[in-house]
Image (tube, helix red, strand yellow):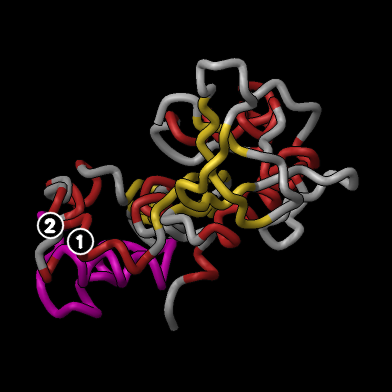
Amino acid sequence: MAGSTLRPNGTGFERLTDRRGRGDGATSRESAVGWRWRFASRGDGSRSNGGTSANEERRTAKLARLEAVLFVADGPLAPRKLAQHALVADAAEVHRLIERLNAGYDRTGSAFRVEQVSTGWQLLTRPEFAPWLERLHQRKSELRLSPPALETLAIIAHRQPITRADIEAIRGVQSTEMLKQLMERGLVKIAGEDESLGRPYLYGTTRQFLELFGLQSLEDLPR
């Protein structure tokens, strides 16, 4: 409405009025045209919406840079790498900023959280959104494991380092092809050689295995 204005009236709801000149030199008339919620700043730096500090709502440059780096990263980044890319002092400050980010995400009910995965940190969606996101975006083929492959991977994850003969003794079937598939997908690697006769290879899981399954370490595996 032409000429409408918000009148300062403390904090909370305030009247939206219409001021128009009468054209005859008289003072303008004023009529109520509605109400609007006004977030007025106070002298103590808080807002009228529950007294939330303005500093808590506003992202600092460091916090914004860190959030941007986490957003565009293809995978988890170690604290030292995060500090380098976000122009932050050190890993300790990275941890403090991540705590602030997560506190903000929790407070606003965000779909995101920064989680520790393997030896780094990654911006992830919350678990409750996984079913919907799987329908929206088809899962990558490398995450689709057949039951025999998943069984082989579970044995390696829990018993590593382990030889092929020991894997086959547990499964009861030949496992060469399963090992080949898991190694091609970057989930399993050769972790050394056994001291037994013939020095057979030992197999273990990779860092990519931890990242794809959202684990900080092998200690997080279900028992």
Q: Rate crowding at label 1 as few (under 14), some (14 to 19) or many (20 or more) other CA atoms within 10 Å.
A: few
- CB of mark 2 within 8 Å of CB of mark 1? yes
Residue 85 as seen in the image, left or right of residue 97: left
Quarter holding residue 177:
bottom left
Give SS at disc 2.
Answer: helix
Image quarter where the C terminus lies is: bottom left
Quarter holding residue 6:
top right
Tell me if I can see residue 100 in this picture: yes
Where is residue 12 drawn, in percent x and y? 66, 56
The residue pinned by badge 2 equals 135
Observer-nearest of 1 and 108: 1
The residue range painted magenta reads 149-178
At x 72%, y 48%, the residue is 9
Where is residue 201 drawn, in percent x and y? 34, 52
Distance in Å between CA atoms under marks 2 and 1: 5 Å
The type of residue carrying mark 1 is Trp
Observer-nearest of 62 and 205: 62
At x 24%, y 80%, the residue is 170
The residue pinned by badge 1 equals 132
